[in-house]
């Protein structure tokens, strides 16, 4: 083949699509506990604190993997990361599906989180090589859209499957799908088009051999850039509340506050996720077109804060207004995907994987903190009501527990306000503030 030619679009999209399918599965597992709260609390005899910790085990390992994933994506390659991730996630799913107590279930959840934690950063690294640079933010949004589609599949569709088949058979089937996906990734995906005989879109740069010393050096280097530290907090405040609410506490809140069925509550939280993905795609594309990052992220942070407050604290809203606010908060929080391009442009390009992992860590830390903290506050406010062995929490308890979520949203607004605009231009030399 002529190495002067770029890869055909069909091959590039297939490579990206297999990675995106794994990311789809990761989001499915991320929010699945929200649909199975009653079954899990009854099965493992746990309250809100235990359920929050169970869900957060996904994020504990997910976060631990972000920095190593970013650096290994730079030095080892995304193909191995995605393949190993799919197989390990399958093992974790099998362990969770067969667990007889909360401890092995937590371990399975821990394995799943760490395994799928490689997906987004690895896909972005593939995008750097397989697609033109000007499509980077757009692809970031499309990838998030695929992930959110996985979360939506863990809404009403998962509720139907769990109701008809039970949660254990449903999880066993998910494990089989992950094994098949891992095999397909290994056979088809390649780190760079040059491995298929084509020209790469990545900017050629010297690639040093990976070592622990290199890991420490790269991490300390990217942390010296003010934008990276600030965007870390922005990710916490935009993504953390979305994942916390849709992934665990939104469904029981709506059933308590509005008397909705689980199916209806799932539909409302799925609506938030759908528009989160739409916002990520549209706002990412808009950012690429106008060549600005900061104004869109700032506007998204402000709108998200202003929408969360009435959703969580105002007395029963008319359904049309509630859904409208849910749509707005989803669209606004979708601006978080611009942060990947924003962060990548804020450092020299050879740190693309490292800085993507750093930014993604911030996004997941928000959920890791909020999910168990909200559960802990709920248990502190519990009045002793039990239905079928499951604790029931009143509206006052929910409102108290959601205060930390608002605090995170405020942090996002403040942090993005201090970032420096890149105008979609890649940093090539360390700036003076990083020295």
Image (spheres, helix red, strand yellow):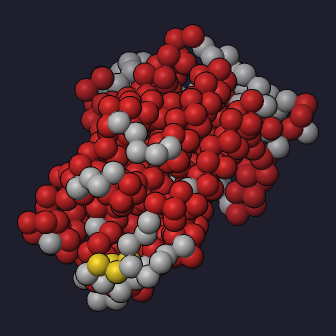
Could you say which is closer to the camera, residue 407 or residue 135? 407
Residue drawn at the location 51% of the way across and 40% of the way down? 310
Residue 369 as seen in the image, left or right of residue 262: right
How many numbered marks does the figure carry?
Answer: 0
Can residue 389 be seen from the camera position used here?
A: yes
Q: Quadrant of the C terminus?
A: top right
Residue drawn at the location 79% of the way across and 51% of the way down? 220
Residue 166 position in % (x across, y down): 15, 72
Which residue is farthest top? 290
Which residue is farthest left? 164
Which residue is farthest bottom? 100
* 110 to 9, vertically: above or below: below
* 44 to 185, vertically: above or below: below
Can residue 155 be seen from the camera position used here?
A: no
Could you say which is closer to the camera, residue 55 or residue 199? 55
Query: Which quadrant would residue 199 be assigned to in this image?
Result: top left
Could you say which is closer to the camera, residue 239 or residue 3? 239
Could you say which is closer to the camera, residue 130 or residue 311? 311
* 134 to 46, vertically: above or below: above
Residue 427 as seen in the image, left or right of residue 330: right
Residue drawn at the location 40% of the way across and 39% of the way down? 317
Residue 226 position in % (x across, y down): 80, 38
Q: Quadrant of the N terminus?
A: top left
Residue 63 as seen in the image, left or right of residue 348: left
Residue drawn at the location 91% of the way across and 31% of the way down? 432
Residue 328 position in % (x across, y down): 45, 30
Query: Which quadrant would residue 90 be assigned to in this image?
Result: bottom left
């Amino acid at each position: 083949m002529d190495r002067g030619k770029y890869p055909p679009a069909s091959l590039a999209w297939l490579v990206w699509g297999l990675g995106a399918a794994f990311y789809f599965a990761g989001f499915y597992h991320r929010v699945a506990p929200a649909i199975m709260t009653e079954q899990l609390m009854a099965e493992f005899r746990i309250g809100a604190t235990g359920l929050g910790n169970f869900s957060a085990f996904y994020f504990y390992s997910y976060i631990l993997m972000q920095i190593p994933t970013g650096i290994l994506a730079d030095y080892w390659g995304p193909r191995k990361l995605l393949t190993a991730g799919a197989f390990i996630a399958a093992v974790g799913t099998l362990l969770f599906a067969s667990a007889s107590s909360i401890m092995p279930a937590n371990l399975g959840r821990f394995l799943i989180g760490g395994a799928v934690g490689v997906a987004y950063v690895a896909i972005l690294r593939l995008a750097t090589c397989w697609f033109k640079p000007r499509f980077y933010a757009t692809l970031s949004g499309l990838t998030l859209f695929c992930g959110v589609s996985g979360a939506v599949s863990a809404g009403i569709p998962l509720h139907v499957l769990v109701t008809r088949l039970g949660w254990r058979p449903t999880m066993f089937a998910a494990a089989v799908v992950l094994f098949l996906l891992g095999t397909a990734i290994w056979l088809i995906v390649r780190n760079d088009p040059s491995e298929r005989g084509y020209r790469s879109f990545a900017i050629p740069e010297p690639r040093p051999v990976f070592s622990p010393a290199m890991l420490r050096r790269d991490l300390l280097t990217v942390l010296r850039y003010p934008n990276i530290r600030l965007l870390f907090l922005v990710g916490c405040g935009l993504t953390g509340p979305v994942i916390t609410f849709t992934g665990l506490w939104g469904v029981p809140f709506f059933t308590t506050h509005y008397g909705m069925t689980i199916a209806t509550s799932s539909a409302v939280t799925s609506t938030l996720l759908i528009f989160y993905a739409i916002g990520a795609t549209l706002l990412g594309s808009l950012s690429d077109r106008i060549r600005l990052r900061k104004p869109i992220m700032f506007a998204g942070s402000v709108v998200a804060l202003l929408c969360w407050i009435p959703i969580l604290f105002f007395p029963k809203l008319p359904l049309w207004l509630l859904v409208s606010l849910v749509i707005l908060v989803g669209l606004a929080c979708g601006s978080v995907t611009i942060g990947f391009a924003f962060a990548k442009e804020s450092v020299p390009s050879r740190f693309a994987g490292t800085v993507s992992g750093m930014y993604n860590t911030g996004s997941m830390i928000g959920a890791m903190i909020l999910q168990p903290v909200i559960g802990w506050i709920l248990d502190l406010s519990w009045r002793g009501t039990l239905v079928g062995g499951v604790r029931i929490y009143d509206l006052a308890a929910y409102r108290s527990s959601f205060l930390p979520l608002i605090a995170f949203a405020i942090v996002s607004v403040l942090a993005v306000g201090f970032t420096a605009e890149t105008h979609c231009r890649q940093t090539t030399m360390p700036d003076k503030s990083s020295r």
